[in-house]
Image (cartoon, helix red, strand yellow):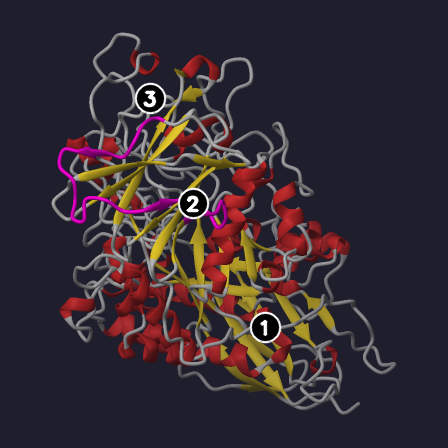
Amino acid sequence: MIAKDPGDVVFSPAPPTPAERRVRPGSPYPLGATFDGAGTNFAIYSENAEAVELCLVDPEGHETRVPLRYQTAFVWHAYVEGVSPCQRYAFRVHGPYDPKRGLRFNPKVRVLDPYARAIDGLERRDAGLFAFDLLHKDRDLVPSQNEANGAPLGVVCDSQYDWEGDAPLRTPFAQTVIYEAHVKGLTFRHPEIPDPVRGTYLGVAHPAMVEHYQKLGVTAVELMPVHAFTDNGFLVDRGLRNYWGYNTLSFFAPDVRYRSGDGLATEVRQFKEMVKQLHRAGIEVILDVVYNHTAEGNHLGPTMSFKGIDNPTYYRLVPDDPRFYFDYTGTGNTLNMRHPQTLQLVMDSLRYWVEEMHVDGFRFDLASALARGLHEVDQLSSFFTIIHQDPVLSQVKLIAEPWDVGAGGYQVGHFPVRWAEWNGKYRDTLRAFWRGDGGIAADLGYRLTGSSDLYERNGRAPYQSINFVTAHDGFTLRDLVSYNHKHNEANGEDNRDGNDNEHSWNCGAEGETNDASVKTLRARQMRNLLSTLAFSCGTPMLVAGDEFARTQGGNNNAYCQDNEISWIDWSLDDEGRALLAFTQRVLRIRREHPNLRREDFFRGRRIRGTDVHDIMFFRHDGAQMSDEDWANPVTSSLAVFLAGEGVGAVDENGDPQLDDDLLLLLNGSGADLDFRVADVGTKRSWELLVDTTNDGAQEQRAPGEVTKLVGRSLKLFRRPRSSA
């Protein structure tokens, strides 16, 4: 159909060159700006708009307005000849401004295309971002009469790129080790990376970083948000920035902050180059994505894209008063995943990053918000159903942050069968155990063995538990053992922000200290946590810098700290180099032992008719754990026997996979304990692999002999698999 014509082409304030272009109806699909070699097709969805204008902006800022006169199934579209890559563009959308009905159209506001593959820069607050009169007493109920052109402009892109045969790595989850990192913070202070590429996409894939990943033993880099985002106004007012990037403006455009040099859309090519180089090194790329909300905030927030295009389509509005937004994210709004078009937007974005940008998976921020029906979290929501059947998305790594801030939002263990989850219970249990909390032996047993209590009942495997001790959100590993309390004063919120319950312990002194005994204990605690992470069933995730004890000075919510608090310092001291070597060693041990990388859950099954089971738990005195021991509130030590013939996996030939027997001894108490090593199966001696009190320790123990574990320490022994 032909929509209402708002008029002929309008030039404001002066026409670009050439002044006239031929405009044809074009196509409603695909959405966004699609260049075909001779011109560009533009398509944008708005079911409540009365008219839409395409704005073509030349290098001097002059704007040409082209009415999109054709509408198909609520998609406004036109093909404009001669529009080529690097053309900047936006839209002006006409319709009612009536917030009480949920409608916030204002053609005075130039809005960004939700499908823009690139943007021309950051938001320009001085050019205006609000559709309402900021000075009026009724605030958002009164539309602004001033031009607001501060939103970034979209950039027409050419999708051509020579991938040189790049293909998905498809690293099995059971063999995956994830390295969470911030694009800028990872390399901005790296001395071996040239200045032009420090803190950029190209820096992430620099040979110095590739060597680090490979020596460390990680198989996937999980990047904190790279979707184009904005800085919150309240942070700008404090002289701060939204460093983490969980404030998405565009779900298709890589953020320009992380490109090297200038030039429109160069960040798209550089992102692809990063992925290609990492793939060549055997490293997958996982993106941390934010589809639960956008940067436009609540009813008093700016209008940069979705609000001004079709507010009721893209956002969850309160039914009784659609002036206001549901907020399950703590950011002011929640994306409306119940609407087919919003659902299509997210799916199109995900497929774009897989098919066009070659990423290997996604970690979904506050994923519970994506699954909400009216209020409750629904595992069978359309979002999960569509991903489950999608031939592209169902084959990549899907990781949920299984909570949001709404009622009932904590959903650890409740996501669908193809999904992995950040296991918050694993984090909390390990922190509490090594802090010395008693009475959590049973919970620890589950966490060490893949959390079958959370994942087995719905058909998932141990590797779908993403095990982590630290993440970007919270203390670093070093701060976890150095602070009892958060120290977020630099954020300007009077230390009210951030998690108040980190399960941390400062080992006897708050913050940095010269006390040798405290420093020794902290070093051991970091080794305890890292080695437990490496030796647990599940998929381990490290945070960049934890492998050599980086600190944020006790700031556990450094989301706004684009400075030395967050940037990784690569000038390692002796302690940092020693911890790095230790981390490399425990991850190598994990890689060499399939017993630590199980693909199914332990069954407690007997090994070939003997009294040996695939897994057995012992007290420190050598007796098997009883129900009373598991429930004992003072139990703070544990021995775990893993039979080498009970791996439960097959090798590349389809034969049962065998491994050495392993014995993991953990003493979370403050007292020294004598552990009697397991006397099961063969009588071969146990050989020490890891002692968190002494990196160079060597020890052999016959079955039934005693080995001493000092307070808060761990040992791992191995012996050749049983021939019984």
- Quadrant into which the C terminus falls: bottom right
Tag 3: Cα neighbours inside 10 Å, few (<14), some, or many (≥20)?
some
Query: Residue 22 magenta-drawn?
Result: yes
| Residue pointed to by mark 2 | 502
* Magenta highlight: main SS: loop
The residue sitting at 50% across, 54% down in the picture is 350
The residue sitting at 49% across, 66% down in the picture is 360
Q: Secondary structure at mark 2?
A: loop
Q: In the visual, does 218 lie left or right of 393?
A: left
Q: Secondary structure at mark 1?
A: loop
Q: Compared with residue 152, is residue 234 higher up or lower down, i.e. above or below? A: above
Whole-angstrom CA distance, mark 2 to mark 1, is 31 Å
Q: Compared with residue 111, is residue 200 higher up or lower down, i.e. above or below? A: below
- Start and end of the magenta stretch? 6-32
Whole-angstrom CA distance, mark 2 to mark 3, is 33 Å
- Looking at the rendered image, the disc whose residue lies closer to the viewer, 2 or 3, is 3
| Residue pointed to by mark 1 | 172
Is residue 127 in sight in this rendering? yes
Tag 1: Cα neighbours inside 10 Å, few (<14), some, or many (≥20)?
few
Residue 86 locus on image (x, y percent) = 25, 56
| Residue pointed to by mark 3 | 300
